[in-house]
Amino acid sequence: MSACQKAARPLTQCLRISQASSQSSRTIRLFTSSSRLSEEAVTETASFTPTPIYDPETVTSSKEERKLMRTGVYPIGSRRRRAAIKTSENIPFEQLPYQCFQEARKILQADREEKLALIAKERLRISNLVATDSATINGGQKVKDVRLDSMRRHLEYLKIQADINDPLIKKRFEDGQGDMTKPIYRYLADRKWREYQRKIIVQRIEQLGIVPDVLPFFEPTAEVRLAFRQKNVQPGEFVDSRISEVPPRLKVQVFDKGERLVTIVVIDSDVPLIEKDDFGSRCHYLAANIPLSPAETSLPLSKATEAQVIHPWLPAFTQKGSPYHRYSVFVLQQEPGKILDTASLKEQIKRDGFSLRRFVDKCKVTPIGMNIFRSIWDEGTAGVMERAGIEGADIEFKRKKVVALKPKQKARGWEARHASDKYKSLRR
Amino acid sequence: MLLPRLQPPLRAAIASIARSAPSVQSTACLNEAFAALALKPLVFVRHASHAQQGAVNKAKDGPGKRLGAKKSGEQYVIPGNIIFRQRGTHWFPGDNCAMGRDHTIYATESGYVKYYKDPERHPKRQYIGVVFKRDQVLPLPRNSHRRRRLNMVAVKMEVPEVAEGGEVAVSGVTLEGGEGEGRKEVKVKKAKARKGEEGRDLKLRPGYMYRESNWEIGRAAERAGVKVKPFKPRDRWTAWKKREVRFAKNAEKRSLGRKIGGK
């Protein structure tokens, strides 16, 4: 029995009677809007159900959790919370009988009504302004556009303000059930991202020198998460060559509304060039015209179609002795309505010597998010290079000897001083 | 303390005069002597400063520490060359330079020294950097890519040759240490392991000693299959038996010693 079940035992004993009585009379209302399916099965059919369906809100034992996770649904919240929901009266949160809480809720609801009224008013104003002729406005079309823009921004602000105080919205967001097509959940997700994960990415960008080397300046506005098969990759983590042999899966979360087309680039910025005594860059993956929206976050790179892929996935490899290679995965947003011609880009853009600055300028895309991993030589690199048909697995890099500025020290000792012909007679 | 300057020779002379001539002439002589003494009064001396005062309040100035620039601007340096010695940070390390624990600025790349200011990095600080080309200007333009040098040579890796035809007899001796490349399988004559030393894996350690690891030594008993009867706390009979055996052995040892020693 799990610890939380042990903790909930006195409560269970207390409520067993009430539960037993209620089971027969009515189904227990949970925090979820729908009633418990497993209970329904018990009350409706007398026979034993062969495949019990687990509710993500009330699974408590690890066995049940694992079975639920295998179906693709994840349990919500902590196990302690789920045990509490299972064993308590399950009064819906908004109906909790605390006077102060209910009074506060009334105030918040009144405030929400006010905000909704303001939203309606603002919408009306916007529609009126759109309808008016720009010639009648003092300043013309430009002033009209500026005014419309600021009014629309204010409208977005009001939409957030109407919902930000709602505890159920907060709860739904924290349970991962927020609908990203709604602005409030996008706002909450953006805030959460900026609190921690974005700071990590910005730190990695600065530490690993991505900004001056790959792009002149970059501010992330979308969350990009990287995983190879089942293994999640922390930003800047060293990934084994055998793991990065397959194309990764991206989870990109944008925080502004609307669907857009993105381009994904994976660039290696530390390719050693012996002749130039410098480092070059190489493109390991390039795909364009990939649709992305706040609700659909999953982008497996292996599932990109032939029409979208410009350069297919090249496994990450680092030759022995070379310093670590940085692999940056960039998500670039294309201009609204613009579709890149992948066929022509396939001829024009080469893998070696790929410059992201030039690509961004040419195709007029804006970088919105990035992630990064590193790679060094390990036991599997030779095999990976062989399977991918890359030459150079047997090359090792050794440091060049630095010539000292000091003159070589003269030989010391009696023998050295008497080595010339003058002392031939003294020689042995 | 003011000490009177003593004139011992004069005093001694007066004393001897007084002893030798106790007549009226002596008193006259004595009077003369004392008059001479009075003419030359006792001198009490006081100097401006004491030795202690001088040592404590001396102006502090020790030997010079040879601080300052050791390499001038546009001078060629190699990694490790000290460029500037300082107390505190008059100069900060810039590109391809680092700072030691006593704020010494030294080069980490071969190149040419540059002294410069970078207001975008810090409004007041001044930096020392190393560039790869003599005419390159520091600070670099805003948001431009970093200049880097590979400083490496590509060498073909040696593939280890495996002896063809037959097994390579590698028994308890294995060659260890060094890089993986260039490792050759050496044909070692299979030395027959002595009884009780089967399964010993002697490796070549630094100092040209063939040795097995300490943990392997510790498990020698396990390998040999040594069986030890578990200790039973309240089994006095086994304890007595063991004690008797021990006493007998000790007695034999003592008698043996007496036989040889007391010869």
Image (tube, coloured by chain):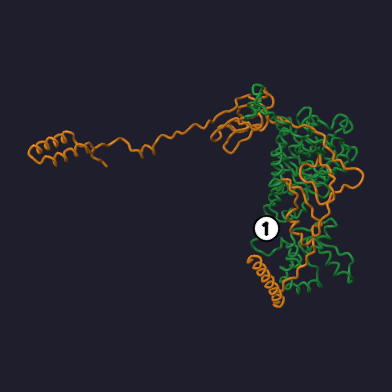
Chain colours: A green, B orange
Query: Is residue A354 among the parts visible in the rendering?
Result: yes
Location of residue B144 with respect to B224 vertically, above or below:
above
**Residue A345 image-quadrant placement:** top right
* Element class at badge 1: helix
Describe residue B103's horizontal placement relative to residue A197 as left or right: left
Query: Is residue B139 among the parts visible in the rendering?
Result: no
Rendering coords of residue A166 (x, y %): 70, 54
- Looking at the picture, tell me which residue is in the foreground, A357 or A43: A357
- Looking at the picture, tell me which residue is in the foreground, A287 or A284: A284
Rendering coords of residue A301 (x, y %): 85, 42
Rendering coords of residue B81 (x, y %): 63, 31
Location of residue A131 with respect to A80 vertically, above or below:
above
Q: Which residue is mark 1?
A: A105
Label 1 neighbour load within 10 Å: few <14, some 14-19, many 20+:
some
What residue is shown at x 84% (from left), y 67% (from top)?
A40
Location of residue A367 with respect to A106 vertically, above or below:
above
Q: Quadrant of the N terminus of chain A?
A: bottom right
Rendering coords of residue A157 (x, y %): 70, 44
Describe residue B189's horizontal placement relative to residue A3 as left or right: right
Location of residue B29 with respect to A57 vertically, above or below:
above
Looking at this rendering, what residue extends furthest in the left direction?
B24
Q: Quadrant of the C terminus of chain A?
A: top right
Looking at this rendering, what residue extends furthest in the right direction?
B165
What residue is shown at x 33% (from left), y 38% (from top)?
B50
- Looking at the picture, tell me which residue is in the foreground, B39 or A8: B39
* Amino acid identity at mark 1: Arg
Q: Pointer 1 indicates a residue of which chain? A: A
- Looking at the picture, tell me which residue is in the foreground, B121 or A172: B121
What residue is shown at x 89% (from left), y 70% (from top)?
A48
